[in-house]
Image (tube, grey):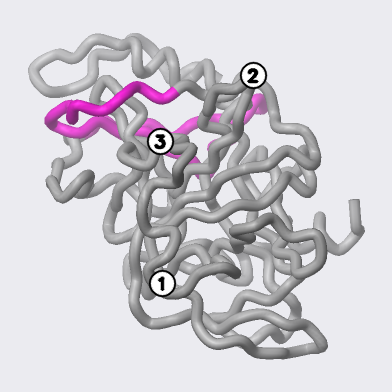
Amino acid sequence: MPKDLASRASRLLAVASLVGATAAAPAGGLVVVSDSGSENTRAPRDDPGWANVGTVWSLTGTYLGNGWMLTASHVGAGPVVLGGRTFNAVPESTVQLRNSDGSLADVIVFRIQEAPHLPTLRIAKITPAVGTPVVLIGHGRNRGARLSSLGHEGFAWGTDSALRWGTNTVFKNDLRAATTEAFATQFRKDGATPNEAQAALGDSGGPVFVKVQGKWRLAGVLIAVSALEKQPPETALYGNFTLIADLSRYRLQIEKLMAAPRERGRVKLKGNPPR
Protein backbone atom coordinates (compact mmCIF):
# COMPACT_ATOMS: atom_id res chain seq x y z
CA MET A 1 0.00 0.00 0.00
CA PRO A 2 1.45 3.42 -0.89
CA LYS A 3 2.23 5.31 2.30
CA ASP A 4 0.35 8.41 1.17
CA LEU A 5 -2.91 6.51 0.57
CA ALA A 6 -3.35 5.67 4.24
CA SER A 7 -2.55 9.23 5.29
CA ARG A 8 -4.95 10.70 2.73
CA ALA A 9 -7.71 8.32 3.75
CA SER A 10 -7.24 9.17 7.42
CA ARG A 11 -7.64 12.89 6.85
CA LEU A 12 -10.38 12.87 4.22
CA LEU A 13 -13.14 14.07 6.50
CA ALA A 14 -11.00 16.77 8.05
CA VAL A 15 -10.24 18.34 4.67
CA ALA A 16 -13.90 18.18 3.59
CA SER A 17 -13.25 15.68 0.83
CA LEU A 18 -16.53 13.97 1.64
CA VAL A 19 -18.60 12.83 -1.31
CA GLY A 20 -21.44 15.26 -0.64
CA ALA A 21 -20.48 16.38 2.84
CA THR A 22 -23.48 18.60 3.47
CA ALA A 23 -26.86 19.19 1.91
CA ALA A 24 -25.62 22.67 0.96
CA ALA A 25 -22.79 21.27 -1.14
CA PRO A 26 -23.53 21.01 -4.86
CA ALA A 27 -24.64 17.54 -5.86
CA GLY A 28 -21.94 15.85 -7.90
CA GLY A 29 -21.62 12.48 -9.47
CA LEU A 30 -19.45 9.87 -11.07
CA VAL A 31 -16.84 11.17 -13.46
CA VAL A 32 -16.80 8.46 -16.14
CA VAL A 33 -14.03 8.61 -18.74
CA SER A 34 -16.23 7.21 -21.52
CA ASP A 35 -19.14 9.54 -20.73
CA SER A 36 -20.51 11.68 -23.55
CA GLY A 37 -23.33 13.37 -21.60
CA SER A 38 -26.11 10.79 -21.65
CA GLU A 39 -23.99 7.65 -21.65
CA ASN A 40 -24.16 5.42 -18.56
CA THR A 41 -27.43 6.99 -17.40
CA ARG A 42 -29.47 3.83 -18.04
CA ALA A 43 -29.09 0.43 -16.45
CA PRO A 44 -26.06 -1.44 -17.77
CA ARG A 45 -26.71 -4.51 -19.89
CA ASP A 46 -25.51 -6.69 -17.02
CA ASP A 47 -27.60 -4.88 -14.41
CA PRO A 48 -26.41 -5.16 -10.77
CA GLY A 49 -29.45 -3.39 -9.27
CA TRP A 50 -29.99 -0.07 -11.06
CA ALA A 51 -33.69 0.28 -10.13
CA ASN A 52 -32.86 0.06 -6.41
CA VAL A 53 -30.74 3.22 -6.54
CA GLY A 54 -32.32 6.61 -5.94
CA THR A 55 -31.70 9.95 -4.29
CA VAL A 56 -31.71 11.04 -0.65
CA TRP A 57 -31.50 14.83 -0.21
CA SER A 58 -30.44 14.91 -3.92
CA LEU A 59 -27.46 12.69 -3.06
CA THR A 60 -27.64 8.89 -3.36
CA GLY A 61 -29.19 5.98 -1.49
CA THR A 62 -29.92 2.33 -2.14
CA TYR A 63 -33.13 0.44 -1.46
CA LEU A 64 -32.22 -2.81 0.28
CA GLY A 65 -35.68 -4.38 0.55
CA ASN A 66 -38.37 -4.76 3.23
CA GLY A 67 -38.75 -0.98 3.41
CA TRP A 68 -35.09 -0.24 4.26
CA MET A 69 -32.80 2.33 2.64
CA LEU A 70 -29.01 2.49 2.91
CA THR A 71 -26.80 5.57 2.58
CA ALA A 72 -23.84 7.35 4.13
CA SER A 73 -24.33 8.73 7.62
CA HIS A 74 -23.23 12.21 6.55
CA VAL A 75 -26.05 12.22 3.98
CA GLY A 76 -28.67 11.48 6.65
CA ALA A 77 -32.19 10.09 6.41
CA GLY A 78 -34.66 12.09 4.37
CA PRO A 79 -37.07 12.01 1.43
CA VAL A 80 -36.18 9.28 -1.04
CA VAL A 81 -36.89 9.33 -4.78
CA LEU A 82 -36.98 5.94 -6.48
CA GLY A 83 -38.22 5.51 -10.03
CA GLY A 84 -39.84 8.95 -10.00
CA ARG A 85 -41.77 8.30 -6.75
CA THR A 86 -41.05 10.03 -3.44
CA PHE A 87 -41.00 8.05 -0.21
CA ASN A 88 -40.77 9.71 3.20
CA ALA A 89 -38.46 8.39 5.89
CA VAL A 90 -40.08 6.71 8.90
CA PRO A 91 -39.43 8.89 11.99
CA GLU A 92 -36.96 7.48 14.49
CA SER A 93 -36.07 4.54 12.28
CA THR A 94 -32.48 5.56 11.48
CA VAL A 95 -29.74 3.26 12.74
CA GLN A 96 -26.06 4.16 12.39
CA LEU A 97 -23.96 1.05 11.93
CA ARG A 98 -21.04 0.18 14.18
CA ASN A 99 -17.51 -1.02 13.64
CA SER A 100 -16.20 -4.14 15.38
CA ASP A 101 -14.74 -1.94 18.15
CA GLY A 102 -18.15 -0.36 18.83
CA SER A 103 -17.38 2.99 17.19
CA LEU A 104 -19.87 4.48 14.73
CA ALA A 105 -19.33 4.08 10.99
CA ASP A 106 -20.30 6.53 8.24
CA VAL A 107 -23.17 4.26 7.16
CA ILE A 108 -26.85 4.36 8.11
CA VAL A 109 -30.01 2.46 7.31
CA PHE A 110 -33.53 3.84 7.71
CA ARG A 111 -37.05 2.84 6.82
CA ILE A 112 -39.33 4.46 4.30
CA GLN A 113 -43.08 4.60 4.72
CA GLU A 114 -43.95 2.37 1.80
CA ALA A 115 -42.15 -0.65 0.41
CA PRO A 116 -41.60 -0.22 -3.35
CA HIS A 117 -41.93 -3.26 -5.57
CA LEU A 118 -38.20 -3.82 -5.99
CA PRO A 119 -36.00 -6.85 -5.42
CA THR A 120 -34.17 -7.40 -2.15
CA LEU A 121 -30.43 -6.89 -2.56
CA ARG A 122 -27.94 -9.39 -1.21
CA ILE A 123 -24.86 -8.08 0.61
CA ALA A 124 -21.41 -9.51 -0.06
CA LYS A 125 -20.17 -11.78 2.72
CA ILE A 126 -16.48 -11.02 2.28
CA THR A 127 -14.37 -8.01 1.37
CA PRO A 128 -13.66 -7.94 -2.38
CA ALA A 129 -10.10 -8.90 -3.25
CA VAL A 130 -7.65 -6.45 -4.78
CA GLY A 131 -8.24 -6.38 -8.53
CA THR A 132 -11.93 -7.30 -8.29
CA PRO A 133 -14.08 -5.47 -10.90
CA VAL A 134 -16.76 -3.24 -9.38
CA VAL A 135 -19.71 -1.19 -10.63
CA LEU A 136 -20.30 2.17 -8.95
CA ILE A 137 -23.59 4.08 -9.15
CA GLY A 138 -24.12 7.68 -8.05
CA HIS A 139 -26.32 10.67 -8.66
CA GLY A 140 -24.62 13.79 -9.94
CA ARG A 141 -22.78 15.73 -12.56
CA ASN A 142 -21.70 14.77 -16.01
CA ARG A 143 -18.02 14.65 -16.85
CA GLY A 144 -16.67 18.04 -17.84
CA ALA A 145 -13.78 19.17 -20.03
CA ARG A 146 -10.39 17.49 -20.05
CA LEU A 147 -7.67 19.27 -18.08
CA SER A 148 -4.19 18.89 -16.67
CA SER A 149 -3.10 19.99 -13.23
CA LEU A 150 -0.17 19.26 -10.92
CA GLY A 151 1.29 17.01 -13.60
CA HIS A 152 -1.84 14.86 -13.70
CA GLU A 153 -4.45 14.63 -16.44
CA GLY A 154 -8.14 14.43 -15.63
CA PHE A 155 -11.47 16.17 -15.99
CA ALA A 156 -13.41 19.08 -14.61
CA TRP A 157 -16.88 18.31 -13.31
CA GLY A 158 -19.70 19.27 -15.63
CA THR A 159 -22.81 21.20 -14.67
CA ASP A 160 -25.77 18.91 -15.44
CA SER A 161 -26.47 15.97 -13.15
CA ALA A 162 -27.93 12.49 -13.54
CA LEU A 163 -27.90 9.04 -12.01
CA ARG A 164 -24.90 7.35 -13.57
CA TRP A 165 -22.90 4.12 -13.42
CA GLY A 166 -19.23 3.46 -13.99
CA THR A 167 -16.59 0.81 -13.42
CA ASN A 168 -13.28 0.34 -11.66
CA THR A 169 -11.35 -2.33 -9.74
CA VAL A 170 -10.48 -2.66 -6.07
CA PHE A 171 -7.10 -1.05 -5.39
CA LYS A 172 -6.82 -1.65 -1.64
CA ASN A 173 -9.15 -3.65 0.58
CA ASP A 174 -8.18 -3.23 4.23
CA LEU A 175 -8.52 0.49 4.91
CA ARG A 176 -9.89 2.43 7.84
CA ALA A 177 -11.24 5.55 6.12
CA ALA A 178 -11.62 7.93 9.05
CA THR A 179 -14.42 6.23 11.04
CA THR A 180 -15.29 3.43 8.62
CA GLU A 181 -13.97 0.04 7.50
CA ALA A 182 -13.43 0.52 3.79
CA PHE A 183 -11.85 -0.45 0.50
CA ALA A 184 -10.69 1.85 -2.29
CA THR A 185 -10.56 2.20 -6.07
CA GLN A 186 -8.10 4.37 -8.00
CA PHE A 187 -8.93 6.55 -11.00
CA ARG A 188 -6.54 5.47 -13.75
CA LYS A 189 -5.55 6.39 -17.27
CA ASP A 190 -3.31 3.36 -17.83
CA GLY A 191 -4.97 0.01 -17.27
CA ALA A 192 -8.36 1.62 -16.85
CA THR A 193 -11.65 -0.28 -17.09
CA PRO A 194 -13.92 0.45 -20.11
CA ASN A 195 -16.11 2.83 -18.07
CA GLU A 196 -13.45 4.00 -15.61
CA ALA A 197 -15.09 6.10 -12.90
CA GLN A 198 -14.13 8.31 -9.97
CA ALA A 199 -16.58 9.54 -7.36
CA ALA A 200 -17.06 13.27 -6.89
CA LEU A 201 -18.64 15.67 -4.42
CA GLY A 202 -22.30 14.68 -4.20
CA ASP A 203 -21.99 10.92 -4.82
CA SER A 204 -22.35 10.06 -1.15
CA GLY A 205 -24.37 6.98 -0.34
CA GLY A 206 -24.07 5.44 -3.80
CA PRO A 207 -23.76 1.66 -4.03
CA VAL A 208 -20.83 -0.41 -5.23
CA PHE A 209 -21.57 -3.87 -6.63
CA VAL A 210 -19.37 -6.92 -7.20
CA LYS A 211 -20.07 -10.27 -8.84
CA VAL A 212 -19.75 -13.33 -6.62
CA GLN A 213 -20.01 -16.70 -8.37
CA GLY A 214 -21.88 -15.09 -11.24
CA LYS A 215 -24.36 -13.16 -9.08
CA TRP A 216 -24.37 -9.47 -8.21
CA ARG A 217 -23.84 -8.55 -4.57
CA LEU A 218 -23.89 -5.16 -2.84
CA ALA A 219 -20.33 -4.67 -1.59
CA GLY A 220 -20.03 -1.05 -0.55
CA VAL A 221 -21.25 2.51 -0.09
CA LEU A 222 -19.47 5.55 -1.55
CA ILE A 223 -18.32 7.74 1.34
CA ALA A 224 -15.30 9.86 0.38
CA VAL A 225 -12.69 10.79 -2.19
CA SER A 226 -8.98 11.46 -1.86
CA ALA A 227 -7.62 14.46 -3.76
CA LEU A 228 -4.05 15.54 -4.41
CA GLU A 229 -2.62 18.31 -2.30
CA LYS A 230 -3.54 21.67 -3.90
CA GLN A 231 -5.77 19.92 -6.43
CA PRO A 232 -8.22 22.41 -7.98
CA PRO A 233 -11.78 22.09 -6.68
CA GLU A 234 -14.43 20.29 -8.71
CA THR A 235 -11.93 18.14 -10.60
CA ALA A 236 -11.11 14.45 -10.91
CA LEU A 237 -7.47 13.68 -11.67
CA TYR A 238 -5.88 10.38 -12.54
CA GLY A 239 -4.42 9.01 -9.32
CA ASN A 240 -7.37 10.09 -7.14
CA PHE A 241 -9.00 7.48 -4.92
CA THR A 242 -12.63 6.67 -4.14
CA LEU A 243 -13.21 5.42 -0.57
CA ILE A 244 -16.00 2.87 -0.14
CA ALA A 245 -17.52 1.56 3.10
CA ASP A 246 -17.03 -2.22 3.18
CA LEU A 247 -20.51 -3.65 3.72
CA SER A 248 -19.23 -7.16 4.43
CA ARG A 249 -18.11 -5.72 7.80
CA TYR A 250 -21.65 -4.54 8.56
CA ARG A 251 -23.72 -7.24 6.83
CA LEU A 252 -24.95 -9.02 9.96
CA GLN A 253 -26.15 -5.75 11.50
CA ILE A 254 -28.06 -4.84 8.34
CA GLU A 255 -29.63 -8.26 7.94
CA LYS A 256 -30.77 -8.30 11.57
CA LEU A 257 -32.41 -4.92 11.15
CA MET A 258 -34.09 -5.90 7.90
CA ALA A 259 -35.58 -8.95 9.59
CA ALA A 260 -37.12 -6.91 12.41
CA PRO A 261 -40.94 -6.56 12.26
CA ARG A 262 -42.68 -3.23 11.77
CA GLU A 263 -45.12 -1.89 14.34
CA ARG A 264 -47.51 0.93 13.40
CA GLY A 265 -45.20 2.32 10.76
CA ARG A 266 -42.11 2.21 12.92
CA VAL A 267 -39.42 -0.35 13.44
CA LYS A 268 -39.76 -2.67 16.39
CA LEU A 269 -36.26 -3.42 17.62
CA LYS A 270 -35.05 -5.15 20.74
CA GLY A 271 -31.98 -3.77 22.50
CA ASN A 272 -29.11 -1.89 20.93
CA PRO A 273 -27.99 -2.38 17.32
CA PRO A 274 -25.60 -5.33 17.05
CA ARG A 275 -21.90 -4.53 16.92
Relative height, residue 132 to residue 203 (above, below): above
Instruction: Identify the residue at horizontal 52%, vertical 16% (top origin).
Output: 252
- In primary-sequence order, the first of circles 1 and 3 is 3
Amino acid carrying label 3: it is Gly
Write the start and end of the magenta stretch as one range. Answer: 92-121
In the image, what residue type sits under mark 2?
Answer: Gln
Residue drawn at (44%, 16%), measured in percent from left and top? 255
Residue at left offset 18%, top offset 30%:
116
Q: Position of residue 148 (x, y in %)?
A: 71, 90
User: Alpha carbon of mark 3 to alpha carbon of mark 2: how far?
Assistant: 16 Å
The residue mark sitting in front, 1 or 3, is 3
Taking depth in this image into account, of 41 and 120 the one nearest to the observer is: 41
Left or right of 1 on screen, residue 151 = left
Q: Secondary structure at mark 1?
A: strand
Q: Earlier in the sequence, mark 3 or mark 2?
A: 3
Q: Describe the element under mark 2 as helix, strand or loop.
A: loop
Category of crowding for the residue at label 2, using alpha-carbon neighbours closer than 10 angstroms: few (below 14), some (14–19), many (at least 20): few
Q: Are marks 1 and 3 in contact (CB under 8 Å)?
A: no
Residue 250 position, x and y percent, is 56, 26
For label 2, the residue is 213
Quadrant of the rendered image containing residue 10: bottom right
